[in-house]
Amino acid sequence: MAVRVKICGITRSEDLHAACAAGADALGFVFYAKSPRCLVIEQAAELLAQLPPFVQSVGLFVDAEPAFVEAVLKSVPLDLLQFHGNETPDQCKSFGRPYLKAVRMKVGTDLVEYCADFHDARALLLDAYVPGVPGGTGERFDWDLIQSDLPKPIVLSGGLNPDNVALAVQKVRPWAVDVSSGVETSPGQKNPAKVAAFIERAKR
């Protein structure tokens, strides 16, 4: 099975086109004010208008007010929502859009329970647990914490880069991998060579 690849934290038109040309399956757009990759609604709408067909757009939110999510969706036609905070299952599904639920992995995390609680999520996105930071840290977690035979697809995130993504795919066998800082020159500025290498090695 070919793994899917999501390039997250897109802020620039040139990065969008480079990622799509390299074979990205999905691009992530951040709507979290504390992130250096955060977009305003107008920026995101302009970027999404440039997406080619068959590349999914994913909007990342962290404990956002429902009115803000609705305002984004009114102008930005996102394909998937990605929730990285303490959102409940009811909050995640209240927007009527397919969604991913991020899980910050640490010892004792019960993914079977998450699968049951978020039974209508399209997948669980597994990221590293860093106290006080909801994601995008560039930290890797212990992949042995992932239980086998989960009833939901897994999107592997956290500390991935072109040097370790092939090993991650071989060991975890995720449905998809997700990268942001691991292919950047600086926060929000992607490195085209790293993006291309990451996608090629993930899919190989």
Image: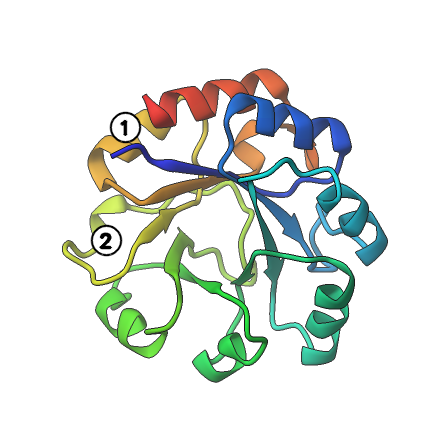
For this rendering, which residue is in front, 7 or 104?
7
Q: Residue at x 65, y 49 (%)?
A: 29
In this rendering, is residue 134 above or below 118? above
Q: Residue at x 70, y 37 (%)?
A: 188
Identify which amino acid the numbered label 2 is placed on: Ile
In this rendering, is residue 151 above or below 96? above
Q: Which residue is mark 1?
A: 167
Other residues around mark 2 within 10 Å, as few (<14) / some (14–19) / many (≥20) = many
Q: Left of 92 or right of it: where is 68?
A: right
Q: Residue furthest left?
A: 149
Location of residue 176 (image quadrant): top left
Residue 139 can be seen, yes or no: yes
Q: Position of residue 117 (x, y in %)?
A: 33, 78
Can you say which quadrant of the picture contains the N terminus?
Answer: top left
3D distance between C-alphas at marks 2 and 1: 15 Å
Q: Position of residue 41 (x, y in %)?
A: 80, 57
Q: Residue at x 30, y 54 (%)?
A: 153
Location of residue 164 (image quadrant): top left
Label 2 residue SS: loop
Can you say which quadrant of the picture contains the C terminus?
Answer: top left
Q: How is the image coloured?
A: rainbow
Q: Which residue is mark 2?
A: 146
Q: Left of 47 or right of it: where is 83?
A: left
Q: Position of residue 158 (x, y in %)?
A: 44, 44
For this rendering, which residue is in front, 43 or 133?
43
For this rendering, which residue is in front, 56 or 200?
56
Q: Left of 120 or right of it: where is 94?
A: right
Identify which amino acid the numbered label 1 is placed on: Leu
Q: Residue furthest right?
A: 42
Residue 87 can be seen, yes or no: no
